[in-house]
Structures are given as structure tokens and as C-alpha cells.
Amino acid sequence: MKFRLPTIRTEVAVAFAAIFVSTATLFVYIYQARIMQTQQQVAVWPYVEWLPSWGDHGLYVEVSNKGIGPALVKKVTIRLDGKELQSLSEMFNMLTDSTFRDYGYSTIQGRVIAAGEQMRIFEIQDKAIADRIRVELMKRNFEYEICYCSVFNDCWTSSGMEITESACD
């Protein structure tokens, strides 16, 4: 009795090769799509910071988007000694024990900050009052948080120069 190896028909071999190549191509396309999605998200990444500045010009706080995409500002939170405040007026009243109103401000909640754009949140030009408020803010626990998102709804919270991922709740 002779042992014979089964013969493989050419059509079957070609069919299996085509299935293998098609499956490999599918996985390559899925991988490439994931890479492209990541590149798109990075291409619109906003990076929002805020910093205070004081001196002879008074006191101001400026927000800037140092990222490469627009920042959609969802929520702004002001806290003084752990208490959430409703407005800058409330904060200035607590710091000066008066109805101080000689300041300029800009609302950023609900706005879009373009890449490279800078905005002043508030500005006090009276040097004496600016120094008084600056000293009070340094003594106390002052928190200003900006929760913002990219166009792909990836969100972060800026607490000055510290940025953390967030849900903007």
C-alpha cells in the first residue's frame, strides 16, 4: 500500500491566500484609522492657562490658549477659602469689605478661546486697591478654575498653570 499526499487544488490555495490578504488588509486599515483619529484629536488640542500680573499697572488676570485648537469654555468656578462664589463682585466685596466696583472684567464662560488668543478676565488699575487685593489673595486660598473642551469634546480643567483631564460637570 502506497501512501499518497493529498493534492491541493490551485483554486483552494488561491482562495485561502485571498482571504488571508483581505484579513490582513482589514487589520491594517483599522490600525491606520486609529492613528488618524489620534492625529486629528492632537491637531485641535487646546491648552488654556491663566496667570496674574501686578505692578505699577495695577493687577490683572489673563487667560491664554497656548494650544493649537480652539477651547470651548464650559464652566468657570471661583472659590475663596473653599467657598464657591457667584461673581467677581462677591469676591472683591469679601476681600475689601466694601462695594468695590472700579474694575474691568470679561466673562469667558460659554465662549470660545481661539488658539493663540489671550483675554483679560479682570483688571484693577488703581495700584493701591490692586496691591490690597493681591495681598489678600496671597493670604487666602484663592481658586479659579476654567473647565474647557476641544472640538472632539475631550475636556480639561485649568487651575492656573496646572491642567488636569476633566468631565466639566
Image: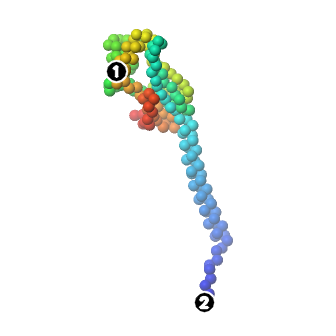
Outermost residue on the right side: it is: 10
Q: Position of residue 97 (x, y in %)?
A: 32, 13
SS class, disc 1: helix
How far apart are the two marked residues, 1 and 2, measured between alpha carbons? 100 Å
Q: Which residue is mark 1?
A: 139
Instruction: Identify which residue, 18 or 118, lies in the foreground.
Output: 118
Q: Which residue is mark 2?
A: 1
Q: Position of residue 60 (x, y in %)?
A: 45, 18
Residue shown at 57% from the left, 37% from the top: 43
Count of picture labels = 2
- Whether residue 66 is visible here, answered yes or no, is yes
SS class, disc 2: loop
Residue shown at 40% from the left, 26% from the top: 144
Q: Position of residue 147 (x, y in %)?
A: 44, 31
Instruction: Identify which residue, 19 or 85, lies in the foreground.
Output: 85
| Disc 1 crowd, CA 10 A, few/some/many (<14, 14-19, 20+) | few
Q: Amino acid at mark 2?
A: Met
Q: Position of residue 26 (x, y in %)?
A: 59, 55
Q: Amino acid at mark 1?
A: Lys
